[in-house]
Amino acid sequence: MIKRVLPYMRKYRINAFLSPVAMVLEVLADIGVPFLMSRIVDVGIKTRDIDYVVRTAVLMIVVALLGMLMGILSSFMGAKAGYGFAAELRQAAYRKIQTYSFANIDEMSVPSLITRLTTDCNLVGQVTMMTLRMAVRAPSMMVFALIMAANLNAELAKIFVVAIPLVFTLFAVIFRKVHPMFRKIQEKIDGINAITREDLAGIRVIKSFNRQDYEAARFDERNADLMDSTIRAVMWIILLFPIMNLIVYSVIISALWFGGHQIVAGTMLSGELMAFTTYIGQIMMSLMMVSMYIMMATRGRASLARIIEVLDVNSEIIESEDPLKSVADGSVSFFDVCFRYPGYRDDILKDINLAIRSGECIGIIGSTGSSKSTLVQMIPRLYDVSHGEVLVGGKNVKEYDIQTLRDEVAVVLQKNTLVTGTIRSNMKWGDENASDKEIIRALKQAQAWEFVSGYEDGLEHRVEQGGGNFSGGQRQRLTIARALIKKPKILILDDSTSAVDMATDAKLRKTFSEELDGITTIIVAQRIASIEDSDRIIVMERGAVESVGTHEELLGKSAIYREIYESQKGGIAQ
Ligand SMILES: Nc1ncnc2c1ncn2[C@@H]1O[C@H](COP(=O)(O)OP(=O)(O)O)[C@@H](O)[C@H]1O
Ligand SMILES: [Mg+2]
């Protein structure tokens, strides 16, 4: 796992190397100070050698200051390496997500991706920093302090033979208890994130259905659950501290007891005992640090695994080795196309065979859930077919360079939105270099200029997140304009005029037939009126093509089409 992510540390490798080095130097200083202190007591004070005391004290201060400096350097470089590494990982994961196919996104789910990019990356940064510092500090401190303690008094150092295994056992017991708890907590945080996202994104719907109380209760429940689990886990950790203190003080008392006897017997000096007790504190602190580190590291490991999952997704959509860079014409064919959404068992598209000529105007109609949206998403290769082939311009869509294909096949998705910015910045999504003249032309074609020209700031008019400051129909017309700016060979509108009034819808169609000559247009619609003048109409039913023909032909041969027609005609006549 480490090997997989090590390259992301490259940029910070100097920091990552120097931070532990500085840490070891700090530890050496921390170990040296008590030793020098014991020399002051045992040699300087005992022999009343003021000169020795002053010299040693100055040396001690210098060592302590150097240690402090090293500590600061180590923290600084450790933080830089840890959080820098996390930032690199986050960026890599973000880039990777941009290459995801729709199928990949369905599979990973957006809330989970957000948690991975935020919480998980942060935790990995924190643990990396701890690894560079604590994971170096604690063991080296322990080893050095043990050596010093054994050197001072091997007899007395036997205390550790009892104390260290005792502490390790205590940690092992608590760790086994707490570790699974932390795993659960992480999952619960994921759950809360998911529900928070869903509820806040849909806050308007929740309010309009008056479901606040229900949703708040649902949230409360999970929130309380998370709190309970966290408290339970933290209780165990808190328990560590008093027990640990008990052990530390017991060890110090026994050291004083046995050491005191040795001093009386003359086999130990009092300064030595002083230093010895300091080493006890350092060794015990290190043990504590190791256990804390292990606890954090296991959480960090889980987070790292979740980030690697993001990085390791194989984008469904694989570009061919030598991709085609141009699309010959706007023809579209389906050969025996079957499709199912990843992770589902049923075919959503069943044996679709279609041949659409370049420049043709095609209408698609059918009940909701009849797979109209799924069908059209195959053309710009937003999903890859499970079986069969989709051809655009006579070539399999898999042979094209993705960008070329999507530039030539413009789709206005049913769930389309605008992004924060201005109308102009949104339009430039279609073509970065579009001039205002071109933008206005597209807005006129999409029947959007009539309201955009009414704004005082025109193209500079602000677009809020998701285009929330426009009506449904206005938003639809803006997204159509955005697609038109691409000057595609194939234009697909998936239910993109559902919120537009009849008169505007009619104007749109008129413009399309007059101005978009030569462009293949595929219009998915609910209203017969929106598609009845199409060259041909495809009737979809439960994932299959029920029939194909002109309005008149279908009225004759398609029962479903007739039914839709009758229901809508009746609706208007009333
Ligand atoms: N992202 C998805 N993941 C899984 N199933 C989906 C997804 N999108 C659509 N479906 C399913 O595919 C079927 C067809 O949906 P869709 O193509 O949107 O129909 P239409 O556009 O005709 O209303 C529906 O049964 C729907 O539940
Ligand atoms: Mg649809």
Image (spheres, rainbow, N blue to C red):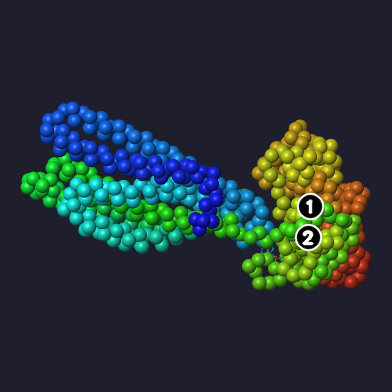
**Residue 107 placement (x, y as % from top left):** 62, 61
Q: Is residue 536 above or below residue 246?
A: below
Residue 399: which numbered mark, if any?
2
Can residue 412 be seen in the rendering of this structure? no
Q: CA distance from mark 2 to mark 1?
A: 11 Å
Q: Nearer the viewer, residue 388 or 66?
A: 66
Q: Residue furthest left?
A: 265
Q: Nearer the viewer, residue 450 or 567?
A: 450
In which quarter of the view is residue 45 placed? Answer: top left
Residue at 30% in and 50% down: 143
**Residue 469 placement (x, y as % from top left):** 69, 42
Q: Nearer the viewer, residue 406 or 228?
A: 406
**Residue 445 placement (x, y as % from top left):** 85, 45
How dense is the environment of label 2, judged by Cα within 10 Å: few (below 14), some, or many (20 and up)?
Answer: some
Q: Nearer the viewer, residue 200 or 231?
A: 231
Residue at 28% in and 42% down: 31
The amino acid on which the numbered mark 2 sits, given as a three-letter code, is Glu
In which quarter of the view is residue 307 placed? Answer: bottom right
**Residue 265 placement (x, y as % from top left):** 7, 47
Q: For disc 1, does the CB lie below 8 Å from ligand 1?
A: no
Can residue 459 be seen in the rendering of this structure? yes
Image position of 63 (left or right of 9) = left
Q: Taking the image as four quarters, which one is ligand 1 found in? A: bottom right
Q: Which residue is mark 1?
A: 404
Q: Quadrant of the C terminus?
A: bottom right
User: At numbered mark 2, what does the secondary structure look like: helix, strand or loop?
Assistant: helix
Q: Are marks 2 and 1 in contact (CB under 8 Å)?
A: no
How dense is the environment of label 1, judged by Cα within 10 Å: few (below 14), some, or many (20 and up)?
Answer: some
